Image (cartoon, helix red, strand yellow):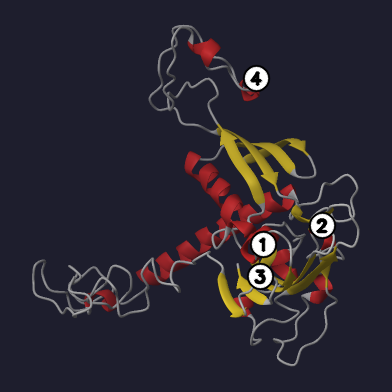
């Protein structure tokens, strides 16, 4: 049978649907893609011009980075900064926002995401190659989610009293949640299968009554209950999955599901192309491995002496073929392209870095979130 989708409930920020006639691994792959690989826009760099609030700069910067921004049609409306030909950032790969708030009365002022303003896009001398990204953006693109909507509660950034002021410049860029959670389009993605536990994938610990202590979900109404004294089917596999997708508002739930399917399709297509290109490689006579792989000299055997240095006497057991942290290395620290987990340039460190400024509270500083 062909895969099918039945939408049971659709709201502004969530969707509930049933996915049938697919494998469990496919359902879980779709869940992971929707959680981590849907591109959105989020604040990535913050320049603090003035901060006389009670919160330090890094608190403010972190809260700004986690504010969801409208990212409809983000695939076509904005480039990845790493793919743009500009020197730093331009209107084709970044969105500029400013926040300038001061309190002049005796009432406490709540600084929220509604105070963020998108700066009008202008041309730059070092901007990237001209494209059509600007024409594909909506009027709300890059603005905080729910801004101007009285039915939507804005995100609280800080509270200030009379005489206090907060002025910052923000640069929002395109990214995915694999790089940082601030780019996540979803707050929760879950699915359930086999609500009656016929497949026995779950062991229910109970004291007296299993059904009373483990009540059935509403999804059990969609399936037939097991018959009394029904035998266990060892060949049964799950084929019906009940999905619940909740977004943060930056992207509609329909777009999240469709983009997730397209991303998963692209990954499988790239895998097929990679396998086909490998199978087409010429082989050495009498060998079943590709020529490029067969021609590489083997590394020394385990325990063989390998090069070390005074700074790192621990040599790689692979003997110089592949280091633990980087390719083409003869030591654990690596002299190739890889880096260690503690390196500032390795493994997408999410800690903010203080690039410039005096460092005094209220002084100008720039933060990479």
Which badge, 3 or 2, comes first in the chain's sequence? 2
Callouts 3 and 1 close, C-beta under 8 Å: no
For residue 361, the mark is 3
Query: Whole-percent x and y of residue 190?
Result: 59, 39
Mark 2–mark 4 Cα distance, whole angstroms, equals: 54 Å
Tag 2, which secondary structure?
loop
Along the line of sight, the residue nearer the viewer: 68 or 302: 68
Q: CA distance from mark 4 to mark 3?
A: 59 Å
Looking at the image, residue 112 lies above or below residue 124: above
Q: Residue at x 86, y 61 (%)?
A: 103
What residue is disc 4 on?
Answer: 221
Work out which residue is located at the far bottom of the displayed protein and give it. 125
Count of labels in the image: 4
Alpha carbon distance from label 3 to label 1: 20 Å
Packing grade of label 1 (10 A; few <14, some 14-19, many >=20) is many
Q: Position of residue 128 (x, y in %)?
A: 69, 86
Task: Report which residue position mark 1 lands on.
Answer: 65
The numbered disc on residue 161 is 2
Q: Is residue 124 left or right of residue 335?
A: right
Separation of marks 1 and 2 at Cα, in angstroms: 23 Å
Q: Secondary structure at mark 3?
A: loop
Q: Nearer the viewer, mark 4 or mark 1?
A: 1
Q: Nearer the viewer, mark 3 or mark 1?
A: 3
Along the line of sight, the residue nearer the viewer: 95 or 237: 95
């Amino acid at each position: 049978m062909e895969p099918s989708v039945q939408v049971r409930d659709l709201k502004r920020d969530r969707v509930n649907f049933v996915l049938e006639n697919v494998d469990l691994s496919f359902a879980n792959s779709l869940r992971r893609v929707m959680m981590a690989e849907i591109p959105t826009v989020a604040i990535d760099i913050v320049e603090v011009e003035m901060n006389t609030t009670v919160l330090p700069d890094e608190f403010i910067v972190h809260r700004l980075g986690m504010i969801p921004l409208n990212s409809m049609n983000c695939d076509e409306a904005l480039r990845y900064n790493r793919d743009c030909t500009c020197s730093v950032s331009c209107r084709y790969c970044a969105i500029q926002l400013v926040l300038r708030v001061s309190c002049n009365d005796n009432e406490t002022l709540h600084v929220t995401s509604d105070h963020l303003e998108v700066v009008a896009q202008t041309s730059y001398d070092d901007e990237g190659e001209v494209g059509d990204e600007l024409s594909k953006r909506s009027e709300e693109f890059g603005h905080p989610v729910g801004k101007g909507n009285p039915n939507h509660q804005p995100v609280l950034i800080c509270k200030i009293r009379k005489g206090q002021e907060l002025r910052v410049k923000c640069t929002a860029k395109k990214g995915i949640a694999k790089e940082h959670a601030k780019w996540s389009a979803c707050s929760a993605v879950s699915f359930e299968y086999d609500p009656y536990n016929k497949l026995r994938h779950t062991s229910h610990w109970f004291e007296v009554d299993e059904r009373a202590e483990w009540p059935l979900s509403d999804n059990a109404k969609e399936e037939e209950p097991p018959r009394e004294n029904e035998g266990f089917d060892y060949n049964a596999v799950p084929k019906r999955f009940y999905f619940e997708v909740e977004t943060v508002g930056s992207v509609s739930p329909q777009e999240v599901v469709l983009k997730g399917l397209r991303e998963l399709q692209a990954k499988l297509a790239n895998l097929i192309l990679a396998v086909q290109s490998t199978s087409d490689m010429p082989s050495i006579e009498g060998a079943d491995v590709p020529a490029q792989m067969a021609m590489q000299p083997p590394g020394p055997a385990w325990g063989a002496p390998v090069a070390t240095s005074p700074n790192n006497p621990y040599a790689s057991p692979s003997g110089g073929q592949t280091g633990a942290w980087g390719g083409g290395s003869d030591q654990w620290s690596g002299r190739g392209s890889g880096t260690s987990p503690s390196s500032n340039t390795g493994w997408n460190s999410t800690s903010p870095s203080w690039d410039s400024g005096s460092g005094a509270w209220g002084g100008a500083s720039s933060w990479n979130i």
